Amino acid sequence: MIAAPTLLVAAGGTWAAIDQGTASAAIPSIPQVPDAFDLGDLQNLAAAPTSHLIAIQINADGTASFAVPRAEVGQGMTTTIAMMIAEELDLPLDMVDVTLADARPELVYNQLTGGSNSIRSLYIPVRTAAAIARLQLMLTAGKLWNLPVEQLSTVAGAVKSASGLTASYASLAVPAAVSTLTSTSVLLKPASKFTMLGTPQSRIDAHDIVTGQKKFAMDLDVVPGAMPTMVARPPTINGKPKSIENLAEVLALPGVTDVAKITYGVAIRAETFGQCIDAIRTIRVTWTGGTVDGESDASVEKKLKAAALPLVVPNILTKSVDAEITFAFASNAPLEPDCAIADIRGGSGEIWSSLKIPIIAQEEIALKLGMLPTALKVHVTQGGGSFGRHLFYDVAMEAAEASQKMGKPVKLSWTRTDDFRQGRTHPMSVSRVRATYAIGNVVSYEQRHTSVRTDFTHGLGEIITATAAKAPIAGNLTFAESIFTLSQASPYNFGATTQLLNEVDLGFNTGSMRNIYSPNVVAARELVVDELAKRFGKDRLAFRREFLKDDRIRKVLDKAAEVGEWGRSLPSGVTQGIGVHNEYRSACAIIVELDCRPETVNRQIKDAVTGPRVTRATIVVDAGLALNPRGLEAQMIGAMNDGIALALTSSLHMKDGIPLEGSWDNYFYTRQWNTPLEMKVVVMPPTNGEPGGAGELATAPSFAAVACAYGAFLGKIPTYFPINHGTLSFEPYPLQPSSPQSPTDGLENPL
């Protein structure tokens, strides 16, 4: 193995008539914390002490291997990592193999996937490790040829000399591994010399995906005798089993081998998942109460509004725009149901699951099982989506608990109903905003965001604690307040600006969804910006240009206006909306067109909520140095669909402490019949030498753009999102049994 023991780094449309000037009279806002130091900077700070442990392996066949300490959940991160290695090693991309690392406790805070930070945090360490591997190969060739390294170069997986000597990496791998560099300095390739990075590349796993060969946790055959296992669950959130009333009857069912009470349910192991579902529908369990029994959308909203922090700027010599907007609970369930394989026997064990923070999972699961973390191996598998869900290890914990109690290996999978009713929810929140203005200027901007408590006990909180002394945040802030402070900043010069968070712990199982707080915070802000433009008698685009803080965001907005044809003639009932956002050291502007005409709003689709439809979307992104523009484009398209869902159709309806939704059939994420007919992504040329974060970047401005388009149609600020939350178009599944009968009429009743 060739490793990096020490990290040493060397370092024309219809919009054209709009006034392009900026108002010199705009009242500057004091820089906010993320302008200088954001959540990604904090993650990088925490990861830095162990970055030297990152290693690239050169194999005997000349290929390179790397086990990346991050999770691949469909975002394409492994492709970009492979591109980095290929670039610095001068190796063809198809000769780089990137897998997912097992839990590595020695990495401490350097094995966390979240906050759009994977590429930001690994850009230098991975390239450095690859560059050192390349140097070691060149030094080895130099010794063989008695030539100084300065006379050597690399190309296409081989070392070459000026005189024409050539040695493949395959021929050098073994002798190069004999001696290890203990200290060295390497120069990384400058961006001007890149031949791979910055070019559009298809995913390295694309062929396996489209041919059905990609392996997820349930596809693995790693433990002989691991059998399907599912969980009968309570009719409430966090209810626990007291007693099983018909255990003998369940054990006598076809295929059932084991039944065991676990913390929040009863695990049932059988020969097939269908037999597990049959057993769940047969078992009778007496349950304890839950933690949020009796809560509803209305009761939670009332508590949030009562807990809102006060707006403090007096409205004496100014006028104001005041808004209060409610954002419903939402699900962050990925398409792949939560699942894990566990084999816990004899005081030790192994787990396979898609985990974004496997070190914490290893520690907490071992503690639950009564064993040392070193006795538990945790393998990170490919994930079929995450959206924040895999920050938590609930399913891995359940699989481990069931396996230990049964004394047998299990393949545990949640049902869709488990995902929506017992999984993590994105918290309901209420955003209050007041913007005061006078004499053609915005004098102050206050935003008070009140949310059901977001659970950050998955490991990000530990990072905040470990780096608190070095982070520029003061006061006795909670984990949530710290994350909010490090991620929220207004891009506008709106005078005295304050954005504060207050959270209320009601006992819900929550988690951060894609872009955490930003979608709701930014949607509320951009709606107020539209109203300010209206009060000022200005075009919404021109108003934003006038008050934006910096040219980088303004250029993104200008390009969106050009490509999206801001201000073009549209039919009555079709409106445009703008969303602007900067986060993760990146910037994004989105312009959409929303069709609110009756024939669109009232269109009939089987078992669906329709309503307004986004017909056109233009997304412009400046991610600093875009390493893989094709992957970046895919991220923008996915986030656009997230924003459409949050604005129009996607929410959980809470009743008696549990969501009514019980499947994707009930939960109206953006479907094919609701996606834009025309969508264009523009990736701006590099604006600096390093990549910004992008995985979550477009979620907030896409939500905001759709919300603003709908507000323009209404002529006022909407007060509840998604706008169709009041429409319940399905008959909820019963709460017991916890899993509905498997469908048998799919061919007769296609979606």
Image (cartoon, rainbow, N blue to C red):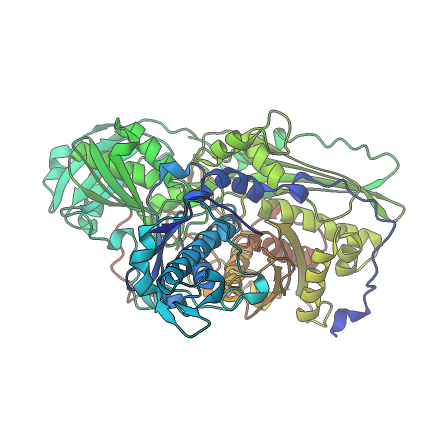
Q: Position of residue 605 (x, y in %)?
A: 46, 64
Image location (x, y in percent) of residue 354 = 35, 47
Q: Is residue 554 left or right of residue 406?
A: right
In which quadrant of the rendered image does the C terminus lie?
bottom left
Residue 77 appears in the figure = no
Foreground of the two, 232 or 168: 168
Residue 544 visible? The answer is yes
Residue occupying image coordinates x 28% and y 33%: 374
Q: Is residue 282 left or right of residue 313?
A: left
In the rendered image, the vertical position of residue 199 relative to residue 375, given as above or below:
below
**Residue at 69% in and 50% down:** 527
What residue do we see at 78% from left, 33% from top? 313
The answer to which quarter of the image holds residue 210 is bottom left
Q: Position of residue 317 (x, y in %)?
A: 88, 36
State the image quarter where residue 252 is shown.
Answer: top left
Would residue 533 appear left or right of 450 to someone viewing this image?
right
The quadrant holding residue 345 is top left
In the image: residue 443, left or right of residue 646: right
- Residue 408 x, y percent position in the rendering: 15, 39
Which residue in the rendered view is the most extreme toward the front? 146
> Residue at (66%, 30%) from the top-left corner?
309
